[in-house]
Image (tube, rainbow, N blue to C red):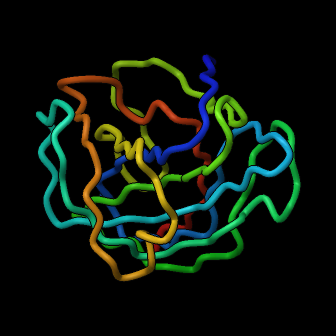
Amino acid sequence: TSQYEYGGGLVANVIEADADATLNTFGAHVSLEQGCDVDLYLFSTSTYDSTDDFEERTWTVVWSQLSANDSSYGAGVYTSEDIGLILDSGTFYALGYGTDCDEDDATVYFSLSLGSADMGVGQSMGYLLDTGYDSANYSEGSDVDLTSAGPDAAYTAPFHIPLSVTEL
């Protein structure tokens, strides 16, 4: 496990659902200083280019939970409320989180593995970034442009974002 201190931004792991399943919960493994909040997001898109090398791509915000840490701070996994959304086989999803903190007040945890990982409902495909994260731009149903890094260019599912799913 590696870690990186930063002030704010959004990170997300991309998966391609290979079975219909219910997304129960997911969380963000981060460390937060007093005054930081972590917001959780589920994005979707019908197509994904696994050869992306830090290109901007448009994703739709399917679900969100602001301030998932509920005024708690420190290192840990901040888990969502019950989500209960159906993930459709063949659709690409990104599970992620955003923080808006002072410089170096948030720490993100990640692992640098190059192979694809089984995420419980599909294989990891890459990751997304937004270094200019602002939660006001991420309302449910909105389209957002995120920097995309496919597995041919970088690591797959590097960020520690545990999830719970039930296959249908």
Identify the residue shown where x is 37% and y is 51%.
122
Within the image, what quadrant is residue 93 found in? bottom left
Left/right placement of residue 50 relative to residue 20 reads left
Tell me residue 134's x, y (percent).
48, 60
Within the image, what quadrant is residue 60 found in? bottom left
* On screen, residue 47 above or below 126: below
* On screen, residue 68 above or below 33: below
Within the image, what quadrant is residue 118 found in? top left
Tell me residue 115's x, y (percent).
34, 23
So how many labels did they put on this image? Answer: 0
Tell me residue 17's x, y (percent).
32, 59
Left/right placement of residue 15 relative to residue 159 reads left
Foreground residue among 167 and 119: 119
Tell me residue 40's x, y (percent).
58, 61
Identify the residue shown where x is 88% and y is 54%.
72
Foreground residue among 88 and 146: 146
Identify the residue shown where x is 20% and y is 24%.
153
* On screen, residue 55 above or below 155: below
Foreground residue among 91 and 137: 137
Q: Quadrant of the N terminus?
A: top right
Identify the residue shown where x is 29% and y is 40%.
125
